[in-house]
Amino acid sequence: MPDPTNSAESQTMTNTSGDVPAIEFRDVVKRFGDNVVLDGLNFSVPQGQRITLIGPSGSGKTTILRLLMTLEELSGGLILIDGDPYTHEYKGDKWVAVPEKRRRVVRNRVGMVFQQFNLFPNMTVLGNIIESPIHVLGKSKAEAVADAERLLEKVGMSEKRDFNTNELSGGQQQRVAIARALAMDPEILLLDEVTSALDPEIVADVLDVLREIAETTDITMLLVTHEMQFAREVSDRVLMFDKGQIVEEADPETMFTNPTHDRTKEFLKAVLGG
Amino acid sequence: MTLGGALLAIVIAVLLGFGSRTRSLWVRGPSRVVVEFFRGTSLVVQLFWLFYVLPVFGFKMEALAVAVVALGLNYGAYASEVVRGSIASVPPGQWEAATALNMTWFHKVRRVIFPQAWALMIPMLANLLIQLVKGSALAYYITLQDVNFWTVELRRATADTFFSYTAGLIVYFIIAYLLTWGMNILEERAKRRLGRGTRPSLRETLGLKPRGLYTPKVPEPTGGAR
């Protein structure tokens, strides 16, 4: 259950200025049955920061992203986005679940790209991208199409605009999925092992696209990846997870060249094959 | 009657199919009970019950309305299982992607999930529809004049049992065959929307301009691919 001892002052801070963290986890617990995946996790991400989550499988990295996208429900604790209650709000004298209607308002700020792309096969490439800008954000069709075309160009997929999604390769699908997430104009972008399902020679294309987005926007990014070189280039901070806890936290240089924790050393050795 | 029964069946199927999937016990429980009840009891008994027993409680319906309701409930219960199964076979990633794009539940279902499930459910719904057509013969017992009724009338008039019942068979077969044909068209159309079509559409076959895979649009010379 959410901790009532935490102050409710964040309630009143509805802004996106620099000093309020984009994401804040407070005592987050996530259990799947008897399996405790996250056990009282606390961390926050400042606006515009790029964070890479690393760690062995089952360490809870993906669960963090899924909780942020509300694909999973919390077992305890709470999450704030820009200081706004996302999962729970302080009402009367206790924390209660945020109703879906209000949660949707905050969820608009969060976008996600999946390992398996998850494009909608019943729509064209363009249809996938404009669907939610039109029906969720309420943009006009002309505006949504113009935005979509700009994004398709950005990810190098302009020629495939009217294709069915299953006429595309994995790498192309993933680039469309990235454009689709960006079309919602998110403040926070969650990238869940976005290159893991791709052939090695295609991975570079997708990473190029992400690198460009990292360079040209100020979107807060949380990425789970096994591409350590990429993580090193784009992230401001790397969090090493094990058993649902942050075991080490450092800038990428330090983390990859001079980790302090034994568990991190072990993990990096195994991943980098060095 | 058949048309009304089929329409009601589809509405009930979709409602109960989704009802059986919700997390809320208050919706799921009754949905399951209705499905199990109408699947588990005989259509003839349901017809008789609605027609002869309900009036005892002071609730009388026209024979036609009774037939529509009974057919709709009975086949709707079967079809709801088809709907439920098809919805369940849409990969969970589709729901998740729709959530990530902040769609409402209704929007997800209408624009993403249902169009995909629809392609899966058509063959099984076609089966049920044909059964429903044949099931409508039972309405003869509650005084309705369907194909079965006319077959019997024909026998009375011509005194030729072979001719009249054979004619009845043929009429049922033609109706069923037309329905199969129509449902096949729907299925092809639904699959093509998912980009899985095996045959080109009528318009594409007749049209001169091919589309899709083999004719990518020529990109603008400037900008575009890097």
Image: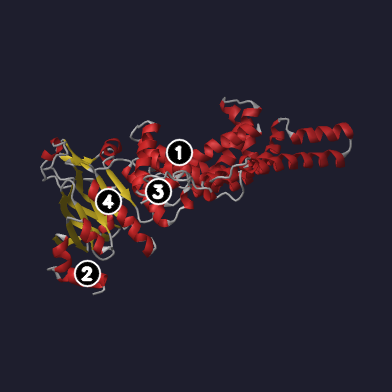
Q: Is mark 2 on a helix, strand or loop?
A: helix
Please give the residue where the numbered disc 3 appears in the rendered image. A157
Which residue type does callout 3 highlight? Met
Q: Mark 2 lies on which chain?
A: A
The disc placed on residue A268 is 2
Contact flag, marks 3 and 2 (Cβ < 8 Å):
no
Q: Distance between the residues labelled 1 and 3?
A: 27 Å
Tell me, yes or no, whether dots 1 and 2 are on the same chain: no
Q: Nearer the viewer, mark 3 or mark 2?
A: 3
Q: How far apart are marks 2 and 4 (CA)?
A: 26 Å
Which residue type does callout 4 highlight? Glu
Contact flag, marks 1 and 3 (Cβ < 8 Å):
no
Q: Which chain carries label 1?
A: B
The disc placed on residue A164 is none
Residue A168 shows in this picture: yes
Q: How far apart are marks 3 and 4 (CA)?
A: 15 Å
Q: Nearer the viewer, mark 2 or mark 4?
A: 4
Q: Which residue is drawn at 49% across and 42% down?
A: B115
Please give the residue where the numbered disc 1 appears in the rendered image. B110
Which residue type does callout 1 highlight? Arg
